[in-house]
């Protein structure tokens, strides 16, 4: 199905029905377009048919229900080893990140997409709206979950921002209750953080080599593949791009989706289609236990034992709607 172009006075966006993907967006500031989202370098290449929809179309933002894409990492922390299976989910990030969504409604500046889940699924249907704000450099999103029966599910929103060319040119500001490094190596030899640790500041995360590493200023020198979870987010996440002089604010309903996971991916993944060329920062609001399979998030796990909810309850009589937004402005000097 053809891509969908949305336009307002100060922003444009392109949406694909495949995985409901926001492929790209441009925000006009003083007449100059700014594109803060990452885009995969393999878009349009042949040989991608056997990859999930979100990888074939990987752009700026999609949704994951249930959120979860990997099995247990090597050398997993003891507190996680008993609850994380070895195998990854059959469909990474669920049908929402793979299937083709139906266009339900469309205008010049907004599109609503729907996706039916299989009859064996507790989730019955998703509806997703992407809108260009008519008079501002901003996008507004909503995601509604409907269920056949009362069900708990991991949920993730998946914006991915570009990484500038020079180290430290992207500043991240996030306020949170407690940070958790990944409970095992994300990718051999390139993760800067020490697995299985906690922290309170993004600029002082326990480092694999000893001491701390500053994850509030990206990219880091060299190749990187790592994940940290910021539990109990207290406000929006702000990203400031020094190379373009822009400020991007990601805001969302933290009463439903309480945490944010940072996925730092900078030319480390080597298999197809990555081939050591992808660069992006996922700033992912989640109700989940990292990116482990749904059964980890919906059962007792080390995060839930620490008091951090890792799933969303949906019932037939109580659909859940999550609203979120991305706003762009010039950095005030």
Image (cartoon, helix red, strand yellow):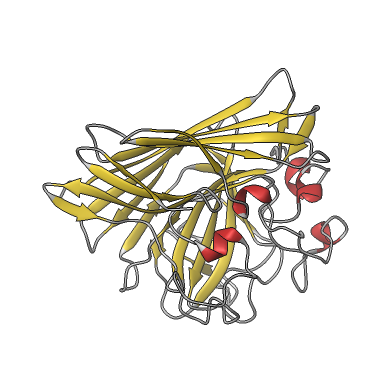
Q: Nearer the viewer, residue 274 or 243?
A: 274
> Image point 19% across, 47% down: which residue?
28
> Taking 28 as reference, is 47 above or below it?
below
**Left or right placement of residue 253 versus residue 68 in this view:** left
The quadrant where residue 71 appears: bottom right
- In the image as oriented, which residue stretches furthest toward the right? 82
- In the image as oriented, which residue stretches furthest toward the front? 1
Tell me residue 237's x, y (percent): 42, 44
Q: In this rendering, does residue 113 appear at all?
A: yes
Q: In this rendering, does residue 331 appear at all?
A: no
> Image point 50% across, 81% down: which residue?
276
> Taking 104 as reference, is 1 above or below it?
below
Query: What is the total number of numbered labels drawn onto the structure image?
Result: 0
The quadrant where residue 269 appears: bottom right
Tell me residue 110's x, y (percent): 37, 35
- In the image as oriented, which residue stretches furthest toward the left? 30
> Taking 317 as reference, is 287 above or below it?
below
Tell me residue 280's x, y (percent): 44, 65
**Left or right placement of residue 301 versus residue 221 in this view:** right
Tell me residue 23's x, y (percent): 42, 55
Q: Nearer the viewer, residue 190 or 269?
A: 269
The quadrant where residue 244 appears: bottom left
**Left or right placement of residue 163 versus residue 33 in this view:** right
> Image point 68% across, 51% down: which residue?
94
> Image point 40% across, 69% down: which residue?
219
Q: Nearer the viewer, residue 60 or 213?
A: 60
**Left or right placement of residue 46 versus residue 90 in this view:** left
């Amino acid at each position: 199905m053809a891509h969908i172009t949305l336009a307002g006075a100060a922003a444009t966006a392109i949406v694909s029905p495949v995985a409901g993907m926001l492929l790209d967006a441009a925000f006009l500031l003083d007449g100059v377009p700014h594109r803060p989202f990452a885009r995969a370098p393999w878009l349009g290449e042949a040989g991608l048919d056997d990859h999930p929809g979100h990888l074939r179309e990987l752009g700026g933002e999609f949704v994951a229900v249930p959120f979860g894409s990997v099995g247990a990492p090597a050398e997993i922390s003891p507190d996680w080893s008993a609850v994380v299976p070895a195998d990854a989910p059959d469909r990474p990030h669920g049908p929402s990140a793979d299937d083709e969504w139906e266009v339900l409604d469309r205008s010049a500046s907004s599109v609503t997409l729907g996706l039916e889940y299989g009859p064996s699924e507790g989730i019955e249907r998703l509806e997703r709206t992407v809108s260009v704000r008519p008079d501002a450099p901003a996008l507004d999103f909503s995601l509604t979950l409907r269920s056949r029966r009362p069900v708990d599910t991991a949920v993730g929103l998946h914006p991915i921002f570009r990484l500038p060319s020079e180290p430290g040119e992207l500043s991240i500001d996030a306020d949170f209750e407690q940070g958790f490094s990944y409970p095992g190596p994300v990718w051999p030899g390139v993760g800067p953080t020490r697995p299985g640790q906690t922290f309170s500041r993004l600029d002082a995360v326990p480092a694999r080599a000893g001491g701390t590493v500053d994850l509030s200023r990206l990219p880091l020198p060299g190749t990187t593949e790592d994940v940290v979870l910021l539990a109990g987010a207290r406000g929006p996440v702000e990203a400031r791009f020094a190379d373009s002089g822009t400020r991007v604010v990601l805001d969302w309903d933290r009463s439903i989706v309480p945490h944010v996971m940072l996925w730092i991916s900078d030319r480390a993944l080597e298999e197809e289609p990555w081939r050591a060329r992808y660069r992006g920062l996922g700033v992912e609001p989640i109700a989940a236990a990292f990116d482990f399979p749904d059964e980890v998030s919906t059962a007792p796990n080390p995060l839930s034992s620490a008091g951090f909810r890792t799933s969303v309850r949906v019932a037939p009589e109580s659909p859940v709607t999550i609203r979120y937004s991305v706003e762009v402005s010039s950095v005030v000097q």
